[in-house]
Image (cartoon, helix red, strand yellow):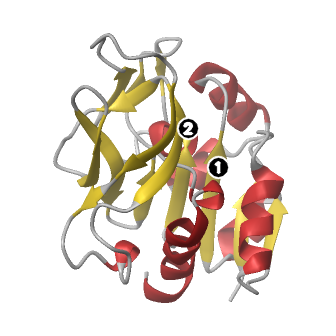
Amino acid sequence: MQLTIIDTGCANLSSVKFAFDRLGIQAEISRDLDKIKSADKLLLPGVGTAQAAMKILQDRNLIETIQNATQPMLGICLGMQLMTEFSAEGNVPTLNLMSGHTELIPNHGLPLPHMGWNRVNYQTDHPLFHGIEQGSHFYFVHSYAVLPNENTIATCDYGEPFSAALQSKNFYGVQFHPERSGTAGAKLLQNFVENI
């Protein structure tokens, strides 16, 4: 099993790799296009702004390779948002791997960013959440979100529901940080490797 973490130049790359190390699963961080194309599974981590991340992907010639990927890919946090068509954070077109727009979380008087542990409710029997208790807590840090749409497989509530996880074809994304979400997050990463 070749598991490749796409080197997006973002700060959470090594923490994602360490999460797999703890599971005894070998993962490699790479921006080598051949390694990305030949991987069995891909991770697309991201923190920071959509505009900055898209520029890095463009500068590294990664956009087309990501868009043409046929193997399962898991976007994490900003990585999930980049999978949609457009981000209001900088008003940039994103990777367009699935429908949906990333918007500023609607103002309900709650502090932004939405930071800390929150409950996630997922689509029953979805393999990404296999063996994870419904309503489990995951760790979030974000000010922008994708409101629920036809690709939403899990939701979280912060004043109103937003997409905690998305899926379209071979592209999966989670808004939370599984690498910082304890047992439930570790199980989700294991599910991505073993069940997807």
From this view, report whether residue 86 is shown above or below residue 106.
Answer: below
| Residue beneath disc 2 | 78
Say if residue 194 shows up in the picture.
Answer: yes
Residue 176, numbered circle: none
Q: Mark 1: which amino acid? A: Pro
Element marked by disc 2: helix
Q: Mark 2: which amino acid? A: Leu
Tell me which residue sits at (29%, 16%) in the image: 106
Q: Quadrant of residue 33?
A: bottom right
Q: Quadrant of residue 41?
A: bottom right
Distance, label 2 to label 1, CA atoms, is: 7 Å
Say if residue 31 shows up in the picture.
Answer: no
Q: Position of residue 32 (x, y in %)?
A: 83, 59
Q: Position of residue 39 (x, y in %)?
A: 68, 76
| Residue beneath disc 1 | 45
Tell me which residue sits at (64%, 49%) in the image: 45
From this view, report whether residue 117 is shown above or below residue 138.
Answer: above
Give the class, few, some or many, for how many residues have Cα within 10 Å of label 2's Cα (few <14, many ≥20).
Answer: many
Q: Position of residue 61 (x, y in %)?
A: 73, 41
The residue lying toward the viewer, choosing from 148 and 112, is 112
Tell me which residue sits at (37%, 83%) in the image: 131
CB of mark 2 within 8 Å of CB of mark 1?
yes
The residue lying toward the viewer, choosing from 27 and 135, is 135
